[in-house]
Amino acid sequence: MIPPDWLPLLPLMVALAPSPVPAAAQVALSSLVSAQVVSTLPDACPEDMVLVDGNHCPALEYQCDRFVDDSAPSCAEYAQKPECRYNEVSKRVCIDRHEWPNKVGEKPAVFVNWYEAKRTCESAGKRLCARSEWTLACEGPKRAPYPYGWERLPSPCNVGRPVEEADPKKLIDPRTREAEIARLWQADVIGSHPNCISPFGALDMVGNVDEWTDNTEEGNDVTSTLNGGYWGPVRNTCRLTTKSHGPEFQFYQIGFRCCAEPRDGVSTPLPPARAARHELEGRAGPDGWPVAVSEDRAPVSTPRG
């Protein structure tokens, strides 16, 4: 194996080799250098996280082929032809395999507000997942409504359980809160549903507990969003998003998971339109002025200064 300190010297070594360098030797050297560089790249994510790498669709329209029953809002089976109505956005992020505390055998954390979830992630060197990142991690590259596919029933996730009516006063009071949460509790410990897994390898993204996400990128006042639903009789799809609760809201079934930037240094490619714009900007136009790109992406020459 070539010592890492020698890698910058390899082009010089090739240049000083007797001419001509045989083609086979050049190919072998190139392959060796590539293998050495790849072997030194760090893993994209820590062991307790998975890599999500794909295109997110901001607005997706599903068609339900079969409902659970006439009185239920849940779709039993969706048509396998979701249509993306907006430009896709490239995403590359690490996400926790499980709900926080992301440890198999422990109960998922609940009764945390959006601020607490955000601070907890940051204290672990991570951050709260953006809603778009969370959605992509759940539905996968085929954009299925459930992490495991297109049909809700039978479900490998913890969903559809009957729930008891909560007593808000007991939840608010620290003296009675723990007992009230225990009475209402129907979540399973982390790792109980190995088949409730997304194409990227994240588990329990629907059902079990609701999960806080960060909706700041939407550019509006609703920053605190909830995704995935919980163990009760709700829709529990990857696109299920609750926007009606403020960041200080907390309840017996609300948890979260964290995200982080990949640590392998691989950057996310620009979307095609932005990449074309980036390529044009700065070039000289026919009149000698640098090229700028207007909002409608038409290249125009603009004078310096």
Image (cartoon, rainbow, N blue to C red):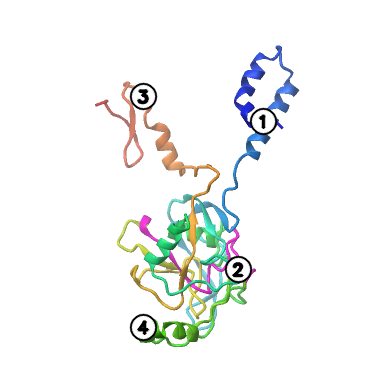
Mark 1, other Cα within 10 Å: few <14 / some 14–19 / many ≥20: few
Label 1, on which residue?
3
Circle 4: element type: loop
Residue 128 visible in the picture: no
Residue 199 figure quarter: bottom right
The kind of residue on which mark 4 rests is Asp
Q: Are marks 2 and 4 in contact (CB under 8 Å)?
A: no
- Say what amino acid the circle numbered 3 marks: Ala
- Return the disc, 3 or 2, that comes first in the chain's sequence: 2
Q: Nearer the viewer, residue 42 or 146?
A: 42
Disc 2: which residue:
104
Frontmost residue, 223 versus 82: 223
* Residue segment shown in magenta: 193-217
In this view, the residue farthest toward the left is 305
Q: If you read the primary sequence from the N terminus, does the residue marked by circle 4 or circle 1 appear first?
A: 1
Q: Which residue is mark 3?
A: 284
Q: Residue furthest top?
A: 19
Residue 173 numbered mark, or none: 4
Mark found first going from the N terminus, 2 or 4: 2
Q: CA distance from mark 1 to mark 2?
A: 40 Å
Mark 1 to mark 3: distance in Å?
A: 43 Å
What whole-number distance in Å separates the C-alpha atoms at marks 3 and 2?
58 Å
Closer to the chain start, of discs 1 and 2, is 1
Q: Local crowd at mark 2 within 10 Å, few (<14), some, or many (≥20)?
A: some
